[in-house]
Each structure stands twice: as C-alpha cells, then as structure tokens.
C-alpha cells in the first residue's frame, strides 16, 4: 500500500527505494529530509516505492504495482510522473510522452573548458556565493511565485550545505547562473543553467557549467543532469559523454511538457521517462486531491531549465 511517509519504517522504505538511482537518490531523500515535516502530504512510500508530489508532477523511485500506482496518482490529481523505466513499470493506462537522459561526470574526471572570446570572458566576474534572491530573480524575472519558491528552497538547501550556485556578473548585473540544487548521497544534481538573452550563444553558459562540474568532481561528487532531447548536442559539445539512448516518443505531447524541461549533464545511460494519464475525449479532469493542492514548489523550479 502507498502511504504517507510519517513513520521511521516508511522513511526507511523511501530512502531504500531511491538508493543508488542516478538523480533520484540526490533529489528525493534530500527533499524528504528538509521538507518532510513542513509538507507532509508531499512524500509517500510503498514497500519498494518512493514517491514525491511536486505540483501536478510526481517523481517515482523503485517500483510498485502498476494499477495501484495509477489509481493513487489519479486520486492525487497528478498529470504526470517521472520514473526510471528500468526499475518502475508505467502506471496502468498512462502513455509514454518523452524520454530524458541522465548524464554526468565521474569523480576525478576533468572536462576541457569550452572556448569563449577572451575579451568577453575577462569582462565577467565569477560569484561563487551569489545572493539567493539575485539568483531567483535571474531565473524567474516575470514569475514572482516561482521566484519566491526558488529563493526559499535555495536558502533551505544552501544553509545545510546541500546546494551550490554560481553566477557570472557583468557591470554589476547577473548575466549567467548554474547550480547544483541537490548535493546528497555522492551526487550533485545540476540544473537551472540560465544566460541573459544578449549573451546567449557566446559560450559563457557552457564554460560555467563545465567549471562547476569539474569542481564538484574534484571534490568526489558525481555531477548529474537530466537532459531533454533537443539539448543533447549542446552537452555533447561540452565533451560530456552519454551512456544511453535518447528517445522522443511520438505520442500526443502533454499540455505541460514545457514545464518538464530539465538541465543537463551526463552519466550513465539511464533514462527517466515522463508518462501522462490518457483520458477519453470529452471527459473532465478529476479534481486534485487536497493533499496535493499547493503552488508549484521550488523543487520543481530547480529541476527545470528555461
């Protein structure tokens, strides 16, 4: 039975289901540790399942009975679930929409720095401890709710040594940022790479990503990323190596697919699949479960790449 994580036994099941899974073992146990008390309706466990609800998206690690999982997600009003297709079978009646690939860098490995025009790079200043609100404002300048959520999560994780964010400044303005928004269990999940529009395509974002990945790998971490299909070429050019196939599945794309564009990186050929419940034409959506009703949380923000 899938139940709220509110006992030591369920917390242990939650952690065990995530253990050793790229990306998921960095994100889910850390979120549960930090936000489990303040947001108890967000985390659930089955005998071999860990489930985190983030807005209308669920993240699943481990495995569960497909029919039970489908019923539970529908009851909670979830429109999508992200899971490891090698471990967890899709919920009954849900359709594969897109494949994301996990990339990463092994500890001790060093990526070459991408070329950037010398004059441009010398005009930039690296800030290894930018204010959280400055970062949040750079990521979500026109979305106050997501900005505030991102600020809150970054403060919570960075104060515990579980997040690292860098920024490039030019003329007193933040023009580029990237972060490891979940540093846990030997992994550093990197996300939210963002460059100001006038400087895009000049290589500064790629160089900042490589510099941070190299620094984290030198500290013994595994930098890991989730990569959408259209971004594979960019990360391959950074000399990151992919260990898995990429699939863009031609089923009907979900309405909120753009909310699931993730930052990138590279590790081991695991794929994380996005599934969406298929409803008969003309059938209204089931109301969201009260336990899952909340604004889009920062955990979703910091897993998303604009």
Image (cartoon, rainbow, N blue to C red):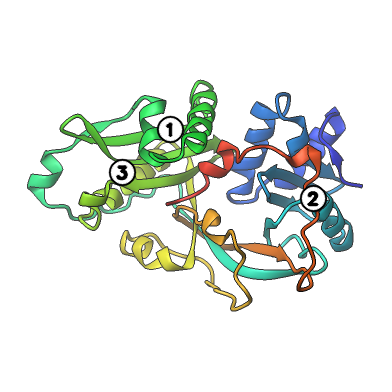
Q: Secondary structure at mark 3?
A: helix
Name which residue lies at 63% across and 47% down.
Answer: 24
- Rendered image quadrant of residue 252: bottom right
Name which residue lies at 63% across and 69% down.
Answer: 97
Q: Which residue of the protein is positioned furthest toward the right in this rendering?
A: 1
Residue 299: give x, y in percent of width and height.
58, 39
Q: Left or right: where does residue 113 sit relative to residue 38?
A: left
Mark identifier at residue 287: 2
Compared with residue 77, is residue 284 higher up or lower down, i.e. above or below?
A: below
Name which residue lies at 35% across and 29% down.
Answer: 134
From the image, state whether disc 1 or disc 2 is nearer to you. 2
Q: Secondary structure at mark 1?
A: strand
Q: Residues within 10 Å of mark 1 (few under 14, many from 20)?
A: many
Mark identifier at residue 211: 3
Give the residue number, with chain letter if any, for mark 1: 164
Q: Tags 3 and 2 in contact by the CB under 8 Å rule?
A: no
């Amino acid at each position: 039975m899938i139940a709220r994580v509110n006992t030591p036994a369920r917390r242990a099941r939650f952690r065990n289901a995530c253990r050793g899974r790229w990306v998921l073992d960095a994100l889910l146990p850390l979120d549960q540790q930090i936000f489990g008390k303040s947001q108890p309706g967000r985390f659930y466990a089955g005998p071999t399942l860990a489930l985190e609800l983030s807005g209308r998206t669920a993240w699943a690690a481990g495995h569960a009975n497909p029919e039970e999982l489908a019923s539970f997600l529908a009851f909670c009003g979830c429109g999508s679930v992200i899971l490891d297709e090698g471990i967890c079978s899709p919920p009954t009646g849900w359709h594969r929409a897109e494949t994301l690939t996990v990339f990463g860098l092994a500890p001790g490995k060093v990526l070459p720095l991408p070329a950037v025009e010398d004059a441009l790079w010398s005009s930039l200043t690296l800030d290894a401890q930018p204010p959280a609100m400055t970062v949040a404002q750079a990521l979500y300048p026109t979305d106050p709710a997501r900005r505030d959520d991102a600020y809150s999560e970054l403060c919570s994780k960075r104060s515990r040594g579980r997040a690292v964010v860098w920024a490039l400044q030019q003329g007193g303005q933040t023009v580029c940022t990237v972060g490891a928004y979940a540093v846990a269990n030997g992994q550093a999940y990197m996300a939210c790479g963002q460059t100001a529009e006038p400087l895009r395509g000049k290589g500064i974002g790629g160089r900042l990503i490589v510099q941070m990945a190299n620094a984290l790998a030198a500290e013994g971490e595994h930098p890991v990323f989730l990569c959408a299909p259209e971004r594979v070429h960019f990360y391959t050019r950074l000399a990151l190596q992919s260990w898995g196939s990429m699939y863009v599945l031609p089923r009907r794309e979900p309405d909120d697919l753009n909310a699931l564009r993730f930052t990138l990186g590279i590790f081991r050929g695991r794929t994380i699949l996005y599934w969406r419940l298929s409803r008969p034409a003309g059938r209204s959506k089931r109301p969201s479960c009260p336990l899952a009703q909340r604004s889009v949380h920062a955990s979703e923000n910091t897993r998303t790449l604009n």
